[in-house]
Image: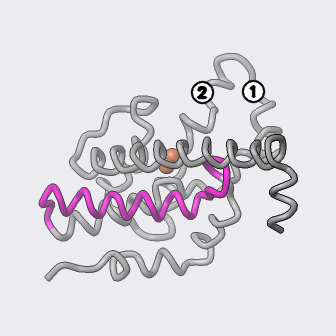
């Protein structure tokens, strides 16, 4: 019997530290780490089913996808900018969010939700090609799901900014009347 997305993820989705991702902006506009993580997990769940993965691996990749950005800090905050300012040159590049957050999320998620080695490796390399190449079907599904969802979110953010600019400069009178 196929397990539903909700049944596979309920313990993570109701965890206070996962719910805290709602307060972390991610890909601009109204997007948050919570929205991005849930959408990536749903996409990975659909892909895993489409690729006829075994039921236990569908569960594994869905949970890994839900936790792939569970690194636990706001990477756009002033605090993170201050942390980064301690480094310069090559060291600064090596400590950039894009390079460090995969392994960081894998360690943090494993501490709280007990992931297996394949799940941890999949999370650690989800930023491929900025991370090492995925080496399992779970890792490829997670990387693909993340790229698909991120691309869609970036497109939505462009639209969100275009609408905001339009409200501000092109039709301010109409926006005021519609309030
Ligand atoms: Fe990420
Ligand atoms: Fe992501």
| Residue depicted at x 49% and y 55% | 107
Q: In this orientation, which residue lies closer to the viewer: 177 or 121?
A: 177
Q: Is mark 2 within 8 Å of ligand 1?
A: no
Q: Main secondary structure of the magenta part?
A: helix
Location of residue 30 in the rendering, given as x and y in whole percent from the top left corner: 66, 57
Is residue 103 among what the camera can see? no
Q: Where does the N terminus fall, quadrant-wise?
A: bottom left
Residue 8, above or below 121:
below
Q: Which segment is the magenta one?
A: 26-54
Q: In this orientation, which residue lies closer to the viewer: 103 or 37?
A: 37
Q: In this orientation, which residue lies closer to the viewer: 135 or 24?
A: 24
Q: Residue 71 appears in which quarter of the rendering?
A: bottom right
Residue 25, above or below 162:
below
The residue at which mark 1 appears reads as 87
Residue 160 as seen in the image, left or right of residue 120: right
| Residue depicted at x 41% and y 43% | 147
Q: Which mark is residue 3?
A: none
Location of residue 78 in the rendering, given as x and y in whole percent from the top left corner: 83, 45
Location of residue 85 in the rendering, given as x and y in whole percent from the top left corner: 80, 31
The residue at which mark 2 appears reads as 94
Is residue 33 among what the camera can see? yes
Q: CA distance from mark 2 to mark 1?
A: 9 Å
Q: Where does the C terminus fall, quadrant-wise?
A: bottom right
Q: Is residue 50 magenta?
A: yes
Residue 172 as seen in the image, left or right of residue 135: right
| Mark 1: secondary structure | loop
Q: Residues within 10 Å of mark 2 (few under 14, many from 20)?
A: few
Q: Residues within 10 Å of mark 1 (few under 14, many from 20)?
A: some
Q: Is mark 1 within 8 Å of ligand 1?
A: no
Location of residue 99 in the rendering, given as x and y in whole percent from the top left corner: 54, 34
Q: Earlier in the sequence, mark 2 or mark 1?
A: 1
Q: Is residue 28 magenta?
A: yes
């Amino acid at each position: 019997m196929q397990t539903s997305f909700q049944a596979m993820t309920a313990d993570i989705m109701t965890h206070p530290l996962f719910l805290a991702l709602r307060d972390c902006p991610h890909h601009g506009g109204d997007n948050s780490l919570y929205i991005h993580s849930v959408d990536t997990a749903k996409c990975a769940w659909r892909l895993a089913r489409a690729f006829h993965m075994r039921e236990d691996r569908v569960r594994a990749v869905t949970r890994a996808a839900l936790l792939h950005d569970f690194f636990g800090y706001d990477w756009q905050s002033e605090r993170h900018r201050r942390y980064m300012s301690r480094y310069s040159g090559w060291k600064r590049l090596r400590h950039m969010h894009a390079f460090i957050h995969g392994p960081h999320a894998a360690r943090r998620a494993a501490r709280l939700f007990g992931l297996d080695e394949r799940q941890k490796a999949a999370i650690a390399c989800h930023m491929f090609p900025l991370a090492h190449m995925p080496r399992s079907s779970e890792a490829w599904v997670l990387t693909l799901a993340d790229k698909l969802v991120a691309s869609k979110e970036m497109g939505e953010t462009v639209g969100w900014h275009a609408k905001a600019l339009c409200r501000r400069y092109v039709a301010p009178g109409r926006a005021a009347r519609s309030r």
